[in-house]
Image (tube, rainbow, N blue to C red):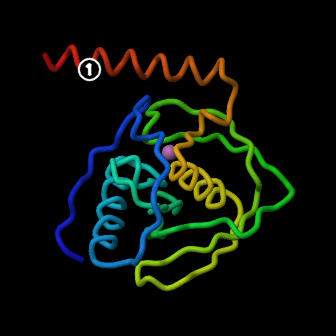
Amino acid sequence: MGVMTLLAIIVAPDPRLKISAKPVAKVDDDVRKLMDDMLESMHSANGIGLAAPQVGDERRVIVVDVSAKDADPAPIRMANPELEWVSDEYLIHEEGCLSLPEHFSDVERPGAIRVRYLDYDGEIQELETDGVLATCIQHEMDHLDGVLFVDHISSLKRNMILRKLTKSKKLAAADDD
Ligand code: NI
């Protein structure tokens, strides 16, 4: 691994969070650097998942690490993740997002998934999982198609959250002047 770069995380609402990301042709050094930089940036922001569009990159790359705070890190780096199977059973988890700072909401998703992806070495991998990891992977995969967790909740609550974020962005911009 080379020198890490901390990437700025884009806060909603922002058109760059609404794009549909493009598949990675090959996991090369450039993609590996993106994965490493994303993990570093995610950990530094105390997040458990991050998708490339959140740092202004249009490739289908996500990173997750749902390990407990006092446990060893358990980073997972994925390129071109695709859901091969989801459970019929849906579960509700409270979700947050580094692009929607300080906002949380219950979201209903399949409780278990099987995902196929390219790993750090460009090898095809399959992972079957449930719980927080399944939720987190689905949340990050949504980002690759321009979907935020607030798109899964009522428009009333979504608009309230986005209005608050717009307001705090304006205040922050005013402070910078
Ligand atoms: Ni997110």
Residue displayed at 40% across by 19% down: 166
Q: Is residue 16 left or right of residue 5?
A: right
> Which quarter of the rendered picture does the N terminus lie within?
bottom left
Residue at point 44% right, 50% down? 47
Query: Splitting the image into 4 quarters, where does residue 126 fall?
Result: bottom right
The percent position of residue 22, horizontal first and vertical second, equals 45, 60
Residue nearest the observer in this picture, 104 or 99: 99
**Quadrant in the picture for residue 33:** bottom left
Q: How many marks?
A: 1
**Above or below: residue 60 compared with residue 24:** above
**Left of 165 or right of it: where is 135?**
right
Seen in the picture, residue 86 relative to 117 is either above or below; the reply is above
The answer to which of 156 and 15 lies nearer the viewer is: 15
Under 8 Å from ligand 1: the CB of mark 1?
no
- For residue 73, what is the image quadrant? bottom left
Residue 32 percent location from the top left of the image? 33, 73
Q: Find residue 129 and report its horizontal and vertical position in percent.
A: 69, 68
Task: Provide the residue designation for mark 1.
Answer: 172
| Residue furthest right as drawn | 88
Determine the residue positioned at 40% across, 46% down. Answer: 54
Q: Report the quarter where the C terminus lies.
A: top left
Packing grade of label 1 (10 A; few <14, some 14-19, many >=20) is few
Q: Name the amino acid type tagged 1.
A: Ala
Question: Judging from the image, what secondary structure is the residue with disc 1 in?
Answer: helix
